[in-house]
Amino acid sequence: MGFVVENHGFLTTIQDQGRLSWQTYGVSPSGFMDRRSASLANILVGNQEGCSLIEATAIGPVLKMAESCIITVTGAKTKVYVDGQEYKQYCALYLQRGQVLSFGVFESGTRLYIAFKGGVKVKEVMGSASTDVRFHFGGYQGRALKSGDEVLLNEEFNEKKFFKSNAIHPEEFSSNIELRVIFGPQDDVLTVDGWRSFLGQGFQIGPHSDRMGCRLVGPVIHQKGDGNILSQGTAYGSIQLPKNGQMIILMSERQTVGGYPEIAHVIWKDLPLLAQGKPGDIVRFKGISMELAQDLYMQEIDEMKSLS
Amino acid sequence: MSGECAALLTFGEEISNELADQIAYWEHNILQENWPEIRAIVPGYCTLLIQYDPAITKWNELCKKLRSLELRSNAQVMHAELPNVVEIPVRYGGEFGPDLSFVSEYTGFSTEEVIFRHSKVRYRVHMLGFSPGLPYLGGMDPLLQTPRLESPRVRIPGGSVGIAGKQTGVYPLESPGGWRLIGRTPLLLFDPEQEDNPFLLKVGDFIEFKPVDEKAFYDLIDKKRR
């Protein structure tokens, strides 16, 4: 039942909102990279925002349905095919047993979300269905999906049920990404020249970026000191500055403590834009106040509420 | 502040037991309050990171709550809880600790002396991180300091006990790493299959390494499988 993975694409994993409270024990929160697209996908099929779904990076998978269900596809802009016929993203689709779901190339963005009404069924580990790829637990047998895997769903769709769904206007992802940040806690390590580079220059998303961290390459950001601090807890969006002056922005599968100075944090509302960034895209930073960042946070929460 | 969803409390700038006590005390008190906005609390050597939901409590409000907690805490007599001491059996040397002889040469102690000095101390778990359940320990005999490997090993078995500079620790899971390996424990520090608590250690625990022979090592592994 559920669906069979006919082609796993590049990195296709099961994710949900993550396992936040276990960070005390050194467990990465993991979870959706682009929280916004994932939430929208869940909302469109009538799920809770944090429900388990499929996240595909860079290349879409090919899935064959073993039961009927309601799905939707959000995130990276691509063509959606059901048995070869093209359908839209950001609206609910009814798939019947035996139908094959496949995708075109990603035209913008790099994370695709496929949500199923009721969610993907796996045994939760530490309260979450998310796959921890590095340490091999959670999700589907603690790993990314492979061709031939049979994945179960929580709910079979009963055709007698009436399903009402809104369509949402698809998102576009730019390859010029402006990120708003809150400075600190270790922004005092920056030299005047360091500040100038950080806020004045563009940085490329490097090829070694992954779910753990987005590694930026570009002008060296100069700092006082040796680029080490006594290890402290990290947050989603922490911008670390190692001695080599090349920033690392911590993403959803981040380590929980880190020993590099954190010069700033990307605000929660803008992290999805970075999560959709691909190697070669350009990132720029702009500082904002705590008050504004928390207002933007509230706006985003309210927008999600209004849609669900 | 660490972004708009986390507050970083800083208690000092040096690693010490007093600071660790203070951080543990704060963590305990915040958890006791059961504040609904708290998502996670992550202790560091000198810091406590509080991840919270600003939709429930804004930054200014959180600061006020923390300040009032501080006043109340100071008014209370801090009662020292008995520390939780975890004994960790270790098979030192041989295939279990391939760098024991290097540590012996580097420090100038015999291998027996290295084992003795490493296992006679009570270590404090300052924090957990890097990988799930990996303890950052304080208290190693400074004379055992040995630099890391110049190029890290690709694969280190889970349970390996090593020395890296001034620190010692245990790798909970198989992973790459650059520590000098002096032994291995048969205990699992992290077992994701244990649903209620997958971790052997928590921040604030103390650990003691206990040298065991090969037979005891394998007996413990057998016992674990049963």
Image (spheres, rainbow, N blue to C red):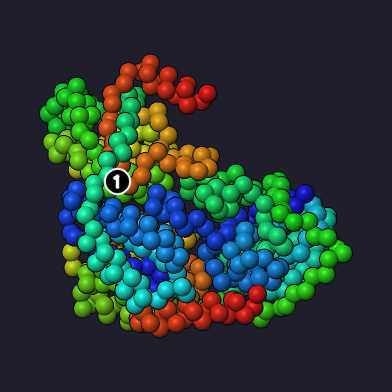
Which residue is found at the position 42% from the left and 60% from the top? Answer: B34
In the depicted view, which residue is nearer to us: A235 or B63?
A: B63
> Dot 1, crowdedness within 10 Å: few (<14), some or many (≥20)?
many
Q: Please, is residue A286 above or below residue B90 in the view?
A: below
- Measured as percent of width and height from the top left, residue B96 is found at 34, 26
Residue under pointer 1:
B204
| Amino acid at circle 1 | Gly
- Measured as percent of width and height from the top left, residue A113 is found at 63, 65
In the depicted view, which residue is nearer to us: B112 or A104?
A: B112
SS of the residue at dot 1? loop
Left or right for B103, reference A45: left
Which residue is found at the position 75% from the left and 74% from the top? Answer: A165
In the depicted view, which residue is nearer to us: B169 or A64?
A: B169
**Residue B162 is drawn in which quadrant?**
top left
Q: Is residue B88 visible?
A: yes
Which residue is found at the position 21% from the left and 61% from the top? Answer: B74
